[in-house]
Structure formats: structure tokens, C-alpha cells
Image (cartoon, rainbow, N blue to C red):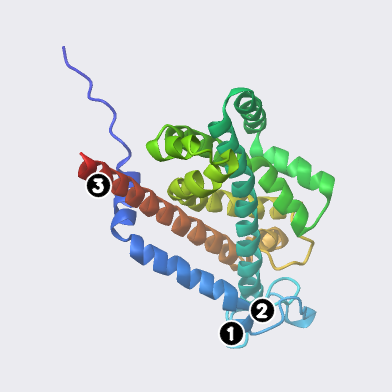
């Protein structure tokens, strides 16, 4: 009887992961250059991103307008550069807020255990079973338009991933000798979490943060596209796509420019996350091999 060979992993994703591991330094440099462009973007913008010129609307790319103008006559390149800072800084704010809440919740849950663990994990499970983007839409709709509302809405549904990760890692670290020794010396629990546990779970947190950046960027752009993000007219990538969707057939560049920018940034972040995860796994493997 012929045996059916087990399904092999997707070759494409495996190749991408191996390439990310080999070129992790190059990816880090690319991300650093992108972030530098984000910080210096407004200084490089040739025009005011809010300045409208109806007589020059939907203009083709030229020396004065390298990417042309949108339906309101605004410089597309200037809006793209200003939107890079707006999108990136807002995404980082969401990730930092979600990571802070999730890390504190997971560390307390995994270290204290008992009733606190059960209550916090039931709360975490209750939030995580709900559709994240749908809940974020509801929260953003209740809070109204504005950047703060979007940041709060996305952070409110994204902290659970960090909480589960930190709880699992904390439970493993809690049983190790250095934690037991600190407890025997009478070190307070919060001090042990802050001084001993958190530094040792920083690696998994960094890997999780790199992956969550891409989800937050897509969610942020999606909320803005649906009209629940930043105010109308703001130079944000999702809002730029929403404002130009009626001109997709005649002027596809108005949608392709911000859309391809989002796609490139998300792919870059995912590749960096794969490389970082592989480096961390290799480091742990080498550490265990050395100890054995």
C-alpha cells in the first residue's frame, strides 16, 4: 500500500524566511533608512500637503510634482511623505501601548498565578475571541474621529497577544534558579518582575512587536479608509486611498502609490520579524548547546 507523504511546508514562505535570516542586517538597515525617511519626510516634501490647487487637479507627474497631484490639486509626494510620519508614529504608539498593558498583565498573571491568573486570562480570552478589527471599528466609532481614538481602539484589542506571550514565558522563567533565589532573599514580587523577568523576556517581545507592527499598519489604514480614522483631508495612507478610489480607473497612480507604500512597509517589517525570530531561536539553541 502506497504511503502518502506528509504535506511539506510552503516552499515560498520557507525561502522567504531563510532569506530574511541570512540578510537580517540588511533588512535592519533598510528599516532604519525608512524610519530616517519618515523623520525627515516633511523636510523633503516639495509642497504643503494640505495646499489645494483646483486648477492643477489630477496633474501628471512633473518636475514640480514628481508623483502628480490628486483630485484636490494637492501634491501626492508631499502627502505621501507627511503620511509616512503620521502612519509610522501612530503605529508605534499603538504597539507601545498594547505591549505595555499586555506585558504588565501577562507578567502579573504568569508570576502571581492562582486567582489573579484565572481572572486575567479569562478577561484576555474574552477580548481575544471577538473580531479585533470589528471591535476596533466600534470603539473608534464611539470615540469619534481623531488620531487618539484610533490609537486607543487598536490598542484596546491588541494587548491580549502580548499578555498571552508574556504569561507563558514568565511561567517558564519563574521556575528558574535566579527567580527562586530572589524569592528566597525576600525580594518583592514587583521588583522581581521588573528587574529579573522583564529583561529576560525582551527577546520574544521584540519579535512579537515586529510582527504586530504590520497588523497595526494595515488596521490603521483600514479604519482610515472606512472613515473611522483621522480627520478628512489628513495626509494618511489609508485616507489617501479612500479619497482617490473614485478615480481608480482613470488615474490608478493615486491609489497605487499609497497602496504600494503600505505593502512595501508591511513586507519589510514581516521579513525583519522573521529574521529576528530566527536569530533568537538560533541564540537559544547555541546557548543550550553550550550549557550541555
Question: Quick one: 261 or 67, which is closer to the camera?
Answer: 261
> Which quarter of the rendered picture does the C terminus lie within?
top left
Q: Which badge, 3 or 2, is on the more N-terminal residue?
A: 2
Q: Position of residue 172 (x, y in %)?
A: 43, 33
- Residue at image coords 54%, 41%: 187
Q: Residues within 10 Å of mark 1 (few under 14, many from 20)?
A: few
Q: Residue furthest front?
A: 185
- Vertical placement of 263 versus 132: above or below? below
Measure the alpha-carbon separation of dots 3 and 2: 57 Å
Q: Is residue 16 left or right of residue 134?
A: left
Query: Horizontally, is 99 left or right of 16 in the view?
Result: right
For the residue pair 291 and 203, the one nearer the viewer reads as 291
Q: Nearer the viewer, mark 1 or mark 3?
A: 3
Pointer 3 residue? 286
Residue 126: quarter of image? top right
Residue at coordinates 33% horizontally, 45% vertically from top-left?
Answer: 281
Residue on which disc 1 sits: 62
Q: Which residue is mark 2?
A: 59
Tell me the distance, in whole angstroms, between the alpha carbons under discs 1 and 3. Answer: 55 Å
Judge the density around disc 2: few (<14), some (14-19), many (≥20) Cα neighbours within 10 Å. Answer: some
Q: Position of residue 237 (x, y in %)?
A: 64, 62
Question: Sequence-wise, which precedes: disc 1 or disc 3?
Answer: 1
Taking the spot 70% from the left edge, 58% from the top edge, the residue there is 242
Residue at left offset 52%, top offset 69%: 35
Amino acid at each position: 500500500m502506497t504511503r502518502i507523504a506528509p504535506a511539506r511546508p510552503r516552499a515560498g514562505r520557507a525561502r522567504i524566511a531563510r532569506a530574511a535570516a541570512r540578510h537580517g542586517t540588511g533588512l535592519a538597515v533598510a528599516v532604519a533608512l525608512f524610519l530616517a525617511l519618515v523623520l525627515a519626510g516633511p523636510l523633503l516634501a516639495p509642497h504643503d500637503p494640505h495646499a489645494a490647487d483646483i486648477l492643477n487637479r489630477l496633474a501628471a507627474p512633473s518636475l514640480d510634482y514628481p508623483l502628480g497631484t490628486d483630485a484636490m490639486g494637492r501634491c501626492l509626494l508631499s502627502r505621501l511623505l507627511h503620511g509616512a510620519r503620521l502612519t509610522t508614529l501612530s503605529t508605534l504608539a499603538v504597539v507601545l501601548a498594547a505591549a505595555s498593558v499586555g506585558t504588565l498583565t501577562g507578567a502579573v498573571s504568569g508570576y502571581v498565578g492562582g486567582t489573579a491568573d484565572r481572572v486575567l486570562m479569562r478577561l484576555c480570552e474574552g477580548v481575544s475571541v471577538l473580531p479585533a478589527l470589528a471591535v476596533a471599528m466600534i470603539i473608534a466609532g464611539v470615540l469619534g474621529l481623531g488620531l487618539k481614538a484610533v490609537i486607543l481602539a487598536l490598542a484596546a484589542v491588541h494587548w491580549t497577544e502580548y499578555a498571552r506571550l508574556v504569561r507563558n514565558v514568565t511561567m517558564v522563567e519563574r521556575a528558574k534558579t535566579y527567580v527562586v533565589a530572589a524569592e528566597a532573599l525576600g525580594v518583592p514580587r514587583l521588583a522581581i518582575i521588573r528587574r529579573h523577568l522583564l529583561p529576560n523576556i525582551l527577546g520574544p517581545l521584540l519579535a512579537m512587536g515586529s510582527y504586530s507592527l504590520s497588523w497595526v499598519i494595515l488596521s490603521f489604514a483600514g479604519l482610515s479608509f472606512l472613515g473611522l480614522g483621522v480627520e478628512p483631508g489628513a495626509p494618511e495612507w489609508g485616507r489617501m486611498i479612500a479619497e482617490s478610489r473614485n478615480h481608480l480607473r482613470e488615474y490608478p497612480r493615486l491609489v497605487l502609490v499609497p497602496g504600494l507604500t503600505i505593502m512595501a512597509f508591511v513586507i519589510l517589517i514581516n521579513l525583519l520579524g522573521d529574521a529576528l525570530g530566527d536569530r533568537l531561536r538560533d541564540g537559544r539553541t547555541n546557548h543550550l548547546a553550550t550549557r550541555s
